[in-house]
Amino acid sequence: MTFDTLGLRPESLRAIADQGYTDPTPVQAQAIPAILRGRDLLAGAQTGTGKTAAFVLPMIETLHATRGPGPIKLRALVVVPTRELALQVEQSIRTYGAHRPVRSTTIFGGMRMDRQVRALRAGVEVVVATPGRLLDHVRQRTIDLRRVEILVLDEADRMLDMGFIHDIKRILQQLPAERQSLLFSATFNPRIRRLAEDLLREPLSIDAAPRNAAAAPVRQVIHPVDRSRKRHLLTHMLRGREIEQALVFTRTKRGANRLAEQLGKDGIRAAAIHGNKSQSQRVRALTAFKKGHSQVLVATDIAARGLDIESLPHVVNFELPNVPEDYVHRIGRSGRAGEAGTAISLVAVEEQDLM
Ligand code: AMP
């Protein structure tokens, strides 16, 4: 299957070709025509499936096709769990809209309100936002959601895990009933289903990755090891180039910092990325990692959400997560867009139950 059969315009096809994509991913092949027809969507798709392009491309086209005269107004809202994901979605809007731009901005915590207010006042058609800060703007009446025609909830499961359900409900109350809604979630549990029922009207359901299952192709390896020896083993694998570069998960922010420090003492370039770091620190760490300046990025589950790192060969579970969904998210970071990856779990006896 090629992109030309999905109903996209030449400008979009050019933007896709600029990226070097030849074939749509399964979620793109299913979602794009349906979104262009105006349908609501319930999509099971995790990071790495090409889900961002699946909603950004048709969203841009719909906005152009239905744009009326008069001043620019906010017509599409993308709600995401983290700042990193917000920045990535915004980048995708620029990338895929390269030949047919729409005006967009991001809204998330940790950045100055007044700058965001200025961007909103200047006029945007698309806002990509995290729930908390978006509500701050709603309360201050610096954003008007009453004309939103397209709503996207991206990584909805993670937003619920992070406790954003009430914020999301409040946001939904601001939106007009007449709209197109798209819900993306890596996993499905009863809470997601309930949200989907409240939100969506006769949605098309598509499933890019098998539910609650790891997306192929990720090789999953387990190393049983004493807790106190984990760091040595990791250093050994990194030094021996058994692992070239890895995203390493810890359970806590403190653990992430400590591990990055210890690896540094072992002579391995490592940075930690988690919720306590400032936005600029996170961006710097991520950039250094993407450019290959650092060998290891240590992350907590929440911080790692939505990180866009292309073709990541290795994910290491330095500690196992508490819930299976997090494991699926973590290892989904390797083997992206069809490339093979390996997920290595360092499992201490104390973690047998989690395993
Ligand atoms: P996402 O699931 O949206 O985070 O996308 C995962 C990665 O796949 C991103 O780095 C995209 O640039 C890439 N990608 C998206 N669509 C395609 C495609 N049709 N062919 C190849 N790569 C793609």
Image (spheres, rainbow, N blue to C red):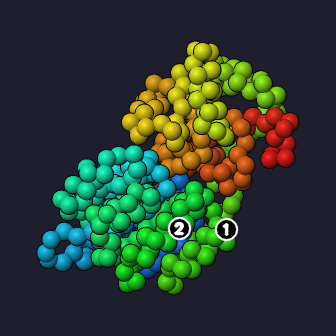
Look at the numbered disc 2 and say if its residue's Cβ is closer than 8 Å to ligand 1: no
Q: Are marks 2 and 1 in contact (CB under 8 Å)?
A: no
Point out residue 175 in the picture as x, y percentages from the top left corner. 38, 76
Seen in the image, is 228 located left or right of residue 77? right
Q: Secondary structure at mark 1?
A: loop
Q: Nearer the viewer, residue 140 or 7?
A: 140
Three-letter amino acid code at disc 1?
A: Asn
Front one among 268 and 148: 148
User: Is residue 143 toward the left or the right of residue 287 in the image?
Assistant: left
- Which residue is at 25% across, 75% downward? 65
Which residue is depicted at the point 62% across and 51% down?
A: 329
Residue 209: where, in percent of width, then height?
61, 61
- Where, by quadrant of the figure, is residue 241 drawn? top right
Give the residue type that dot 2 points to: His
Q: Earlier in the sequence, mark 2 or mark 1?
A: 2
C-alpha gap between disc 2 and disc 1: 17 Å
Q: Nearer the viewer, residue 222 or 8?
A: 222
Asked if residue 279 shows in the view, the reply is yes
Residue beneath disc 2: 166
- Is residue 94 visible from the viewing direction of this image? no
Mark number displayed over residue 189: 1
Q: Residue lying farthest front?
A: 140
Residue drawn at (66%, 21%) of the image:
235
- Which class describes the residues within 10 Å of circle 2: few (<14), some (14-19), or many (20+)? few
Q: Is mark 1 within 8 Å of ligand 1?
A: no
The x, y position of residue 33, in whole percent, is 42, 74
Specify whether 249 is left or right of 84: right
